[in-house]
Amino acid sequence: MGTGRLYATVAAGGFRRYATYRAATAAGVFTNTVFGLILVYTYTALWDERPHLGGYDLAQAVTYVWIGQSLFKTLASGGGGVEGELMERIRTGDIAVDLFRPADLQLWWLAADLGRAAFELLGRGVLPFVFGALVFDLALPTDVSTWAAFLVAVLLGMLVSFGIRYLVALTAFWLMDGTGVTQMAMLTGWFCSGMVLPLNVFPGALGEVVRALPWSSLLQAPADLLLGHADPLPTYAFQAGWAVALLAAGRLVQSVAARRVVVQGG
Amino acid sequence: MKGAFAVDSAFIELDRVEKVFDVHRKTGFMRRELRRVRAVDSISFTVARGEMVGYIGPNGAGKSTTIKMLTGILTPSGGRLRVAGIDPSRERTRLAHRIGVVFGQRTTLWWDLPLLDSYRLMHRMYRIPDARYRENLDRLVELLELGDLLDVPVRQLSLGQRMRGDIVAALLHDPEVLYLDEPTIGLDVVSKGKVREFLRELNAEHGTTVLLTTHDLQDIEQLCSRVMVIDHGRLMYDGPLTGLHEVGDSERILVVDLERELPPIEAPAPARVVKVDGPRQWLAFPAAASAAPLVARIAAEYPLVDLSVREPDIEAVIAKMLHSLGDTTDPPSERATA
């Protein structure tokens, strides 16, 4: 119980830290709205040519766009969560401060990232979605249970996303410059999470592979629940499986890193 | 009871502690060489409960490696290490509740949030009882004059304020040992004074054991009755600061401004003029000696306008000491290759 309160405090801190930067949040809301508009017109052209592409009708495709823009920062599909700070702390050796604390490193950063994600959902997610819903004709469910199922999938997506980004961040223990890894993770994240196109549009073997990768837990899984394209239980099982595997891998890498690596800075 | 006494007199205990790093170095195309670097090479010392000890040495001497082993972040490659009877690397979390650490160049505070948020976090992290937390926070904040700054985001604090903020964060859980790594680095004179005064009081009133690494000789002079000097991972000196001056033959510099340009002052040995620039002259004299007789003599015999005394910097003292020790002791058989 005592530790629960600690990580709750860390999460609250993560929330408030991101809430501090109001101008950045406003700029982000604007950006996501503009990107949403661009994608909506692109998808409209595409679905005009190929109606029911990937099993979505046009309204569902447009809804998918606004779900994606609203969850983009929350799920940090292309990075941009706490992992940047963690990498910087590893690089400068500030990680030493984190290591001597009587707290678990992975849980600490997970809590901080969940706090951040919660803020991004409220601060950056809601407005673009409301804008999309007011301006376009969206295919939204009317029953509360579907919305609740969607939010559970979003939460599981946060865990998977953190699991991926934590592993990316830990590479900084070995690679002193994390720019390359970060960029690779960003491009992979955008493409494989379905930020560019829904994953069910991808043809053949490529589609099969991409839909089995952990990134499909981020956007595709919650979106399909909201659009009524998937059932909750198999979706959750898929997401939870990846979350457990990635977090366990992170734990393993973390213990290896802490053992063999000299903490930077004398 | 006897056991408790043993822990008190050797509250921090190092017995032939070593830390060896394997460093891979590229020596050519596809060729790598493995080198063993002895960052800490068989160091033994004990620190009694309530002592305040300076731990100094040149950059890369092994100071921070020692501190990291004392906190349990790094595991020693050999030897025995105990803090409050606890093996740090085995029981890092249990030990963490009993020690406080301040890294001068790093911060434990949340950069974007008000100071108070970081303190609330410490409250939870160390599971400090509410009443104790309130009491400690009030006391520390008053002593370190942070009362008006609790609601200010850490990124807006000056370096001195941030450092004091970090010291409060390290002490909220009443640690028995405080490790300070360069606590006054980059601070102005006023801030340095505040930090030192606080540490002196903390040690005197709460009996907190303090281990201090620094490059500022005045930190040591004003705070520590005992100094340990480390170089190339080896303990070169352990004793009072005055002894350090004696071993190192270090010198202070008396700068005098005369009324006009004069030939070098004929000072009584061992004091001597080391530099003349117009009416200004520099005299070196042993650091352990008083400046008063020398000043009196010059004032009596020369048209003295102004004077100041420059303390030797710590690097100079250590360099001299290491040099003079090198003349009298056998060179370590297995020196670090770095």
Image (cartoon, rainbow, N blue to C red):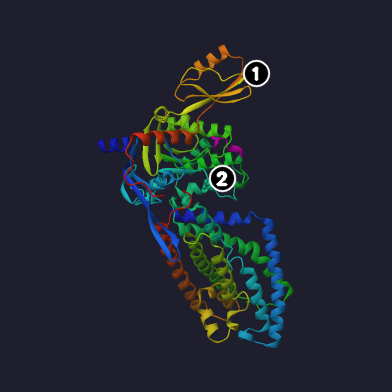
Q: Which label is found at residue B22?
A: none
- Which amino acid lies under the numbered mark 2 shown in the image of this protein? Leu
- Secondary-structure class at tag 2: helix
Q: CA distance from mark 1 to mark 2?
A: 58 Å
Q: Is residue B146 found inside the magenta-colored segment of the image?
A: yes
Q: Which label is found at residue B260?
A: 1
Q: Is residue B299 left or right of residue A96?
A: right
Task: Give the farthest residue toward the right.
Answer: A135
- Secondary-structure class at tag 1: loop
Q: Which label is found at residue B116?
A: 2
Which residue shows up at 54% across the image and 37% down it?
Answer: B141
Q: Which quadrant would residue B245 be assigned to in this image?
A: top left
Task: Give the farthest residue toward the left.
Answer: B2
Magenta segment, principal secondary structure? helix
Chain of the residue on which disc 1 is drawn: B
Labels 1 and 2 share a subunit: yes
Against B12, is B252 above or below? above
State the extent of the magenta-drawn residues as a range.
B141-148
